[in-house]
Image (cartoon, grey):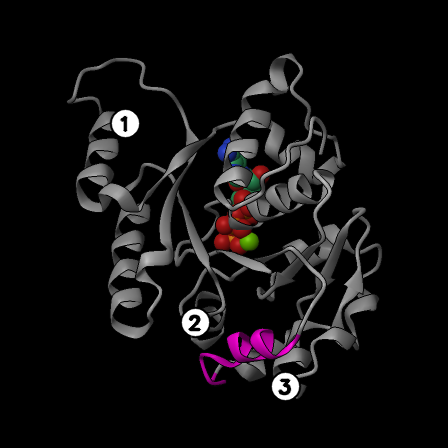
Amino acid sequence: MRSICFSSIKGGTGKSSLCILVANYAAAAGYRVLVADLDIQNSASSYYLDSPDEADRKNIASVLHTERLAENILPSVYPGIDLLASSLDLVKLRAIGDRTLRRILISSNLPYDFLFIDAAPTYDNLVLNALNAADLILTPVAFSQFDYKGALFYEAQLRRETDKLSAWRILFNFHRPARTDNPDALRNQYESLFRDSFGDRIAPVAIPDTALIRRSIDTGERITPSQAKAPLHSAIASLAAYCGVERTTARF
Ligand SMILES: Nc1ncnc2c1ncn2[C@@H]1O[C@H](COP(=O)(O)OP(=O)(O)OP(=O)(O)O)[C@@H](O)[C@H]1O
Ligand SMILES: [Mg+2]
């Protein structure tokens, strides 16, 4: 099972949306997918569950507390995807050992091809559990000062506190093509700043700025390669391939 974590110290960068879309892509392409929601905001859990009550007894906090993984997995509304749902009990686990999830995953032989983890926009031991459990860590960014500072912070913490720096990639989200090649344009200055600072740690995929992301998450509208949806379809397909999803799908 390959584990991919979406994580950033900054809020609203697209972690939950991209985690859901890539997980859906992998499932639609025929893989067995598990999604873990480590954020008490509950975004991925509310997307994947019909009713929040389903997570009362079975959830990721219970996994970390009891070290019983399989029995805390819930089926989701999306075919091919199961869920480790979020829980408010995560708040009580903020001081948990930072490799607990990694240890539990290694000792459980789960029948999934991919685990996608949605982390909370903070930096605590729960986030460290997600980072330490991941084979690939994706930090979505927009071209802004706060995103840039947040990425610098992550790089420093990953280097200092984990062995995961080599698994970490920045992912350009809310991406708009340059309107001019003028290096003084603010957008181009940010792109240069990110590229000069992070080089090969920038994933070779950019997710376009498009209202279709919110619409697809909020209404369940499927993404296909047709006309207006083609740029997002192609970006998520590329991101999925970067995550190790080898098969492709036309609709997810
Ligand atoms: N590429 C994009 N283009 C346009 N809107 C986007 C894009 N990516 C995400 N969004 C929108 O940005 C908002 C924040 O996205 P999302 O909730 O996925 O971020 P997040 O990083 O999970 O936030 P949080 O840090 O609060 O968990 C949502 O309204 C989402 O629809
Ligand atoms: Mg989120």
Residue ID for mark 3: 65
Residue 210: x percent and y percent?
54, 27
Magenta stretch in the rendered image: 95-108
Which amino acid is tagged 2? Answer: Leu
Q: Is the residue 175 above or below the residue 243 in the image?
A: above
Q: Give the CA distance from mark 3 to mark 2.
A: 16 Å
Query: CB atoms at circles 3 and 1 under 8 Å apart?
Result: no
Q: Nearer the viewer, mark 3 or mark 1?
A: 3
Q: Amino acid at mark 3?
A: His
Q: Earlier in the sequence, mark 2 or mark 1?
A: 2
Please name the residue that numbered disc 2 is placed on. 128
Magenta stretch: includes residue 102: yes
Query: Mark 2 packing: few (<14 Cα in 10 Å), some, or many (20+)?
Result: many
Question: Could you give the CA–CA distance between mark 2 and mark 1, rounded to whole angstroms?
Answer: 31 Å
Residue located at (63% from left, 12% from top): 227
Specify whether residue 159 is painted magenta: no
Q: Residues within 10 Å of mark 1 (few under 14, many from 20)?
A: many
Q: Compared with residue 229, is residue 93 higher up or lower down, i.e. above or below? A: below
* Contact, mark 2 vs mark 1 (Cβ under 8 Å): no
Residue toward you, 214 or 128: 128
